Image: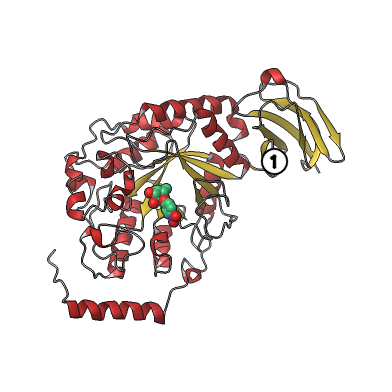
Amino acid sequence: MSKTIPTKYQRLIMSILICLSLIVSPVSAQQQGDIGYEPTQSNLDARTWFQDAKFGLFVHWGVYSVLGKTGAEWVMNHDKMPISEYEKLPPQFNPVNFDADEWCRMVKDAGMKYITITSKHHDGFAMFDSKVSDYDIVDRTPYGKDVLKMLDEACQRHGLKLYFYHSQLDWHHHDYFPRGRTGQDYTGRPESGNWYAYLDYMDGQLRELCTNYNVSGIWFDGMWDKLDADWRLGKTYKLIHGVRSEIMIGSNHHVTPYPGEDFQMFEKGLPGKDPFSKEGHVSALPLETCETISNSWGYNKDDKNYKSSKDLIRYLVKAAGNDANFLLNVGPKPDGTIQDEFKVRLADMGAWMRTNGESIYNTRGGPVPPQSWGVTTHRGNTVYLHVLSENEKVIAVPDLGGKVLRARLLNGTQVNYMETKYGTLFEIPEMFADPNDTVIVVQIDLK
Ligand code: JFZ
């Protein structure tokens, strides 16, 4: 596509006009979103499924995995790689060992119910067969196959749902202009561009993703790059819900959800306690927190900082106790395989879920807020006490919302308790205490 580069004078005029437009009509964040949005019943049903599912796999996979180094999916910005340099990666990306069914078997064995995979990260490279750009896995790599289509078909075979992480921020597209906090002048893009042409391009790829794949949701990220820009969210959200109203929309902007969003995510922290939230506001939407197994989202062969299986199990439990899903991340290698250190931890979590999953799946957080000894989840008149602090002999539980009828461990072992005017004391059967999480099942006589 030939492009006349504006003269210095034209660039100056263009910059002045852009600045004036921002002064004259800065788009306040509150004006963003699909104003007046009302979720359909099928969307509400999708939200209920999502909240019941509780546990999913996050996948950060792209051409950046070829380098597999510090920065991972941010390596282009981290190393200030010009586009001309970064575009040398797709020709090296050939995941010949990618096996979508093997990924799905690993996900199900871990006790996970859905996968959220990067369709496009900040580098702008599409991991699917896009017709609105040739900067994609089919046109630019020796592999030449649409891995998202392959994964979509495998998820349908294995009864898993599929969500796409899609970056609104783009370090490759020439019309992502004015630039935001990242992807500045090192990329080699001209200091000019048509912002709304970029949004049209982004909407074009979103239409492809919502139309050509059996996608259950879009996990947006990148608005934080320039929060005060006119992201035209209303148009984008209407487009997505217009294809299928049950497609759930979430956005990792770390501020209060905008109209049109169907779930709220938190990054590397429990709802309202994550390090990035600007306002810490926890909405009434379905909630999800995401975390890495090492410290990297994308593949980083030097990152050996693996969290223990025990810590990951407890993270899942604490998320459920905070009425949130847990989206746990892997960064696949450039050949399409997932490293053993991740697979062994996912297998450990699956083993724990096979024994304890009734206390997580199809529950909601509470009725008791998180305590010093642990958290609670519930379903109907059953409350699950998740005792996370170890070597406890007795725990005190405030008002459970009704008289305690019975208390036991998941293996049926009787649990002794005593109701007092301050709450109920439960004795922990020492020989059956689980160092990951000792679950006490309490039947309540709901008032
Ligand atoms: C974002 C991405 O940048 C990152 O690569 C990964 O995909 C993660 C799940 O989401 O991480 C962010 C985004 C914004 C901030 C910090 C991390 N922020 O605004 O401080």
Residue 27 in the figure: left or right of residue 38: left
Which quadrant of the figure has residue 176? bottom left
- Seen at 70% across and 21% down, the residue is 412
Q: In the image shown, does 244 or 385 lie closer to the viewer?
A: 385
Number of residue marks: 1
- Name the quarter where the C terminus is drawn: top right
- Name the quarter where the N terminus is drawn: bottom left
Can you say whether 330 is above or below 434 in the image?
A: below
Q: Is residue 133 visible?
A: yes
Q: Which residue is mark 1?
A: 371
x and y, in percent, of residue 64 in the image:
27, 44
Disc 1 packing (10 Å; few <14; some 14–19; many ≥20): some
- Seen at 69% across and 45% down, the residue is 369
- Seen at 21% across and 40% down, the residue is 93
Can you say whether 66 is above or below 24 in the image?
A: above
Q: Is residue 217 visible?
A: no
Can you say whether 104 is above or below 284 in the image?
A: above
